[in-house]
Amino acid sequence: MKRLLSITLAVCITAACNSGTELVDNPEEYVSTLVGSLSHHGFSTGNTYPAIALPWGMNFWTPVTGKMGDGWAYRYDHNWIRGFKQTHQPSPWINDYGQFAVMPVRDGSSVDQNKRASWFSHKSETASPYYYKVYLADHDITAEITPADRAAAMRFTYPAGETSAVVIDAYDGGSYIRILPELQAVVGYTTKNCGGVPENFRNWFVIRFDKAFESMMLYDGPEKGIGEALEFEGEHVLASVGFRTRRNETVNVRTASSFISLEQAWLNLEEIGEKSLDEVTADAKDRWNEVLSRIQVGGGSEEQFRTFYSCLYRATLFPRKFYEIGPDGKAYHYSPYNGKICEGYLYTDTGFWDTFRALFPLLNLVYPSVNTEIQQGLANIARENEFLPEWASPGHRGCMVGNNSASVVADAILKGITPEKDWQILYDCIVHGTENVHPEVNSSGRLGHEYYNTLGYIPYNVGINESVARTLEYAYNDWCILQMARKLDRPSEELEKWASRADNWKNVFDPSHNLMRGRNADGSFQEPFSPYKWGDAFTEGNAWHYTWSVFHDVDGLMEAMGGREEFAHMLDSVFVVPPIYDDSYYGYRIHEITEMQVADMGNYAHGNQPAQHMIYLYNWAGQPEKTRKWVREVMDRLYTSAPDGYCGDEDNGQTSAWYVFSALGFYPVCPASDQYAIGVPLFKKAVINLENGRKVKIDGGQGRLVKKTRMNGKAYDSLFLNYWDLIKGASIDFEMK
């Protein structure tokens, strides 16, 4: 790692600051939850949905335009809504679990998802993090929703009618509903999931109305009513509760759910109690204001403000809480790892392959108390099973490669965010994962560890796909383990083992091409070789993208390529070579390939994570002007606040966190280090309000190049910032040109 200049930081802004620049008030008002929703299976502009939620909340809500079970729950180019779903979906590829839907209708006999659907227009849709409103044209009903952590308030405004109703859909896969007319309530559970849960998984829900039921019907499937019964358990259970309504009469609905029990669901409903929808909305708005105001920006265009805060909103959604507060005021959670009710915190719905890069470093800098809970939750997982999840939703899911929990855990331990009592169990669990693979989900632990630990790489020809990607990520993960081992004062032989394995990236580097390349068990490189071939030896990318995945040893990679000039030349080449590709490994063009092509940046693929840090590597080559050029190019062209505002999958806050860091003017190339690479700030002024009460104040401009940098009034010549310096409070001035 580069050595940083030793500088004493001060809290105050220097005289060179743009003191006249106003910071944004009410940043929550700049958020569009629709960014990224103009997506489909073949082309992603985010693959997001409008999450009506609190930051890191256990339950989100979203309008549903897709059919039941469709991972693309909401698409901006659809014109109908089938219901409003409580969702825990982290991505369309992983899909959802524990979901159920509520839909106000004009005729309570229409419970099928197609029959109850209504046309709508975005012109009659309000979508913010804390409040959603839409006009359902076919029912002449206006629906409103506002969130709490585990509950939500809804208000439906009806036309005059004799058959007005609300449909509750507990979804297929096993569900249960009971109607409680004396309480004006509907309770039940859904077992709907796509994996990652034990057989006893339930999401219990409570739905309470402020209007008495005049009609009630349960359904065994969407077409079969079951008479006068008020309770039913089956494969797919639905309910309809109805009432007469006057024109513009409102029906208020309060709902909550629990993964623990029905009793806990009732307790979770107390988060909103008897508050009106307007009161819950005000609370949610205040919460978002608090979280988003941790970073204040000024001196930009309205579009830049909207893009920035829409990204920060996405970066503060996942991972989500999976714990609940019991009657004794303590945290409890249903464990998807052992099926038991356990005490303590738990968070879920994140893929470390994506989020170790920038999302978790953002939490560590700006929201460390949240990550303290997350890390305690990871320690609880280590107590509940033998592996940390690499993709959790809510338990182990088979997705992506690497052992990047090592990075997430190491970065938090080294920055003092993880409670010391949890260090050893987390370390032991991660080390266990380097010698084992989960028996059912081979993305947890290390697939191919037998080869990696003996040969120093995963061979290309032993039937393990994405061998180079695995090797590179394992090597970086071993470097992260080395940092933890030093912190825990482990024996020297352990340190030597991890240090040696951290160099394993060299075993898949081909100096004849200056690129990473598959290597066979006998030591020979794969033949034939094309740097444009996606997949195969790599994960959702090619050699041009993965060659740079040596986060911990950029100087070593640069030396292997022949020095600074050749290193910079290879970086340049990524943007110069045409966006050609070889999709023969997949047999079709995956959406990430298309997103690379249309970006018009050669073979640079910002829409997928492996290459997102690459731009900042010019700093190591002593060519920071190219870092700054390309950072600004990406921010200006590939991110907007429109429904197609991302350039690929948003992926649980990672792509958004890249933008947030880059707009501030620095980026964490190597998590588990204390170093950030300096780029170019987007705004004339930015303030990071740290949890310790201090501030990082950044003054820049809207040029693309930096002429000079000053730290607390003194010239600053380094191309890197230090975490420990920033959290003391700092003033950074960029003189732009």
Image (cartoon, rainbow, N blue to C red):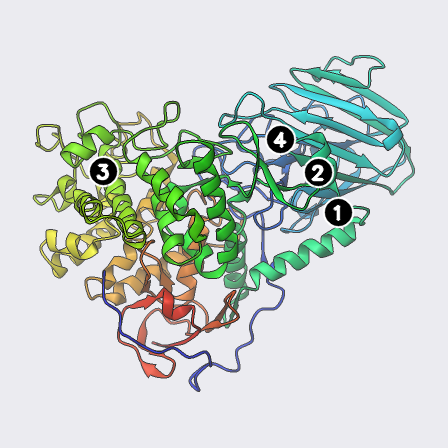
| Residue type marked 1 | Ile
Q: State whether residue 405 is above or below residue 106.
A: below
Rounded to the nearest whole Å, what is the CA distance between mark 4 and mark 2?
12 Å
Q: Which residue is mark 3?
A: 471
Residue 122 drawn at (x, y percent)? 65, 45
Marked residue nearer the N-terminal end (4 or 1): 4
Q: Earlier in the sequence, mark 4 or mark 2?
A: 4
Q: Are marks 3 and 2 in contact (CB under 8 Å)?
A: no
Circle 3: residue type: Thr
Quarter of the image for residue 447 reads: top left
Label 1: few (<14), some (14–19) or many (≥20) C-alpha neighbours in 10 Å: many
Left or right: 108, with 336 as reference point = right
How far apart, in angstroms, are the residues tagged by discs 3 and 1? 49 Å
Q: Marks 3/4: CA distance? A: 37 Å
Amino acid, disc 2: Ala
Residue 243, given in percent of the width and then of the height, sits at 88, 30
Regarding mark 1 in the picture, which secondary structure is present there? loop
Q: Which residue is mark 4?
A: 99
Q: In the image, what residue occupies the spot 88% across and 24% down?
A: 215
Q: Name the quarter where the C terminus is drawn.
A: bottom left
> Comparing marks 4 and 1, which lies closer to the viewer?
1
Report if residue 321 is visible in the image.
yes
Which quadrant is home to the N terminus?
A: bottom left
**Residue 209 % position (x, y):** 83, 36
C-alpha distance separating marks 3 and 2: 44 Å
Q: Mark 2 = which residue?
A: 256
* Quadrant in the rendering for residue 465: top left
Which of labels 4 and 2 is toward the front? 2
As drawn, 225 above or below 215: above
* Residue type, mark 4 in image: Gln
Check disc 1 and report the residue beneath it. Answer: 272
Measure the alpha-carbon separation of dots 1 and 2.
Answer: 9 Å
